[in-house]
Image (cartoon, grey):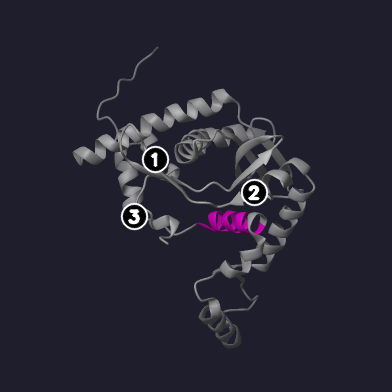
């Protein structure tokens, strides 16, 4: 089975770069970057909360040693040798993730949405209009209140009114809702609602659940249609332009 990251298909996080320009997209996919500490933490939190039974298959806690000393250097070298492809996390991060998991369990709606159903299932489909292969991997596919849902878990700095909405605009979460909904329908011919479970990364690790209305999802589908069209045209032409070379400034 091909690992998800190696499946040759368009995915949301890459298509979002087209909002800057095709040149930005091309650079991103041809120059993969190392994960940041924030991304590593968020991925570990996803794994612990959504798939706790296999968490230790992918992660190991780094020892607390002084790597300036000979003993510390030796202990660290031994740890790296035993990692065997696992990702190292600190004990402090693991403690926070465990508290976040406990906070999720205290929210009945979030717990039901995140801890039932199927997790991290790769979905692939061919876009009907462009013929481009596409993929997504929803955090969870489940049922809630008699309806099927796509559930996405997000760690965030704030769930205060307006804060997560800003994150949606900055990081392309509307595109995610639209693309995932369209893709899963193309794969299963089943309608799903879409919901975000957002959780703050600082105490008390508050959780907020956002059920996306039809308008939000439809706007995301329209954005997906626009971006997959740009992607297709650039792929066919072999041209990946940057920003427009002319702008007009003046008083409105």
Q: Seen in the image, is 87 located left or right of residue 247? A: right
Q: Where, by quadrant of the figure, is residue 5 drawn?
A: bottom left
Nearest to the eye among marks 2 and 1: give it. 2
Queried whether the magenta region covers residue 46, the answer comes back as yes
Q: Are marks 3 and 2 in contact (CB under 8 Å)?
A: no
Queried whether the magenta region covers residue 39, the answer comes back as yes
Q: Earlier in the sequence, mark 1 or mark 3?
A: 1
Residue appearing at x 63%, y 34% in the figure: 163
Residue appearing at x 42%, y 39% in the figure: 16
> In the drawing, what numbered circle is on residue 31?
3
Q: 99 and 111: which one is in front? A: 111
Q: Residues within 10 Å of mark 2 (few under 14, many from 20)?
A: some
Q: Earlier in the sequence, mark 3 or mark 2?
A: 3
Residue appearing at x 59%, y 57% in the figure: 41
Name the secondary structure under disc 3.
Answer: loop
Image quarter (top left, top right, bottom left or bottom right) of the C terminus: top left
Looking at the magenta stretch, what is its main secondary structure? helix
Residue under numbered circle 1: 15
> In the drawing, what numbered circle is on residue 117?
2
Residue 194 appears at what percent x and percent y? 59, 35
Nearest to the eye among marks 3 and 2: give it. 2
Q: Which residues are magenta?
A: 36-48
Q: CA distance from mark 2 to mark 1?
A: 27 Å
Q: CA distance from mark 1 to mark 3?
A: 15 Å
Q: 124 and 114: which one is in front? A: 124
Establish if 95 lies above or below 204: below
Q: CA distance from mark 3 to mark 2?
A: 35 Å
Q: Is residue 72 at all visible to an observer of this figure?
A: yes
Residue 136 appears at what percent x and percent y? 47, 46
Image quarter (top left, top right, bottom left or bottom right) of the N terminus: bottom left
């Amino acid at each position: 089975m091909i690992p998800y990251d190696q499946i040759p298909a368009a995915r949301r996080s890459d298509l979002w770069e087209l909002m800057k320009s095709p040149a930005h997209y091309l650079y991103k996919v041809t120059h993969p970057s190392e994960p940041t500490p924030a991304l590593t933490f968020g991925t570990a939190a996803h794994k612990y909360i959504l798939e706790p039974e296999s968490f230790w298959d992918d992660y190991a806690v780094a020892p607390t040693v002084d790597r300036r000393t000979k003993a510390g250097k030796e202990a660290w070298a031994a740890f790296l040798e035993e990692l065997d492809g696992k990702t190292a996390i600190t004990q402090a991060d693991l403690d926070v993730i465990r508290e976040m998991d406990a906070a999720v369990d205290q929210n009945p709606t979030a717990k039901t949405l995140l801890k039932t159903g199927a997790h991290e299932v790769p979905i692939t489909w061919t876009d009907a209009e462009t013929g481009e292969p596409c993929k997504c991997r929803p955090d969870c596919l489940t049922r809630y209140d008699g309806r099927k849902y796509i559930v996405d878990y997000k760690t965030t700095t704030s769930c205060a009114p307006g804060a997560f909405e800003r994150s949606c605009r900055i990081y392309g979460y509307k595109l995610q809702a639209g693309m995932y909904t369209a893709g899963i329908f193309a794969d299963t011919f089943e309608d799903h609602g879409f919901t975000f479970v957002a959780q703050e990364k600082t105490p008390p690790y508050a959780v907020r659940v956002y059920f996306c209305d039809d308008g939000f999802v439809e706007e995301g589908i329209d954005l997906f249609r626009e971006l997959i069209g740009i992607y297709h045209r650039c792929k066919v032409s072999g041209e990946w332009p940057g920003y427009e070379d002319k702008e007009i400034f003046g008083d409105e």
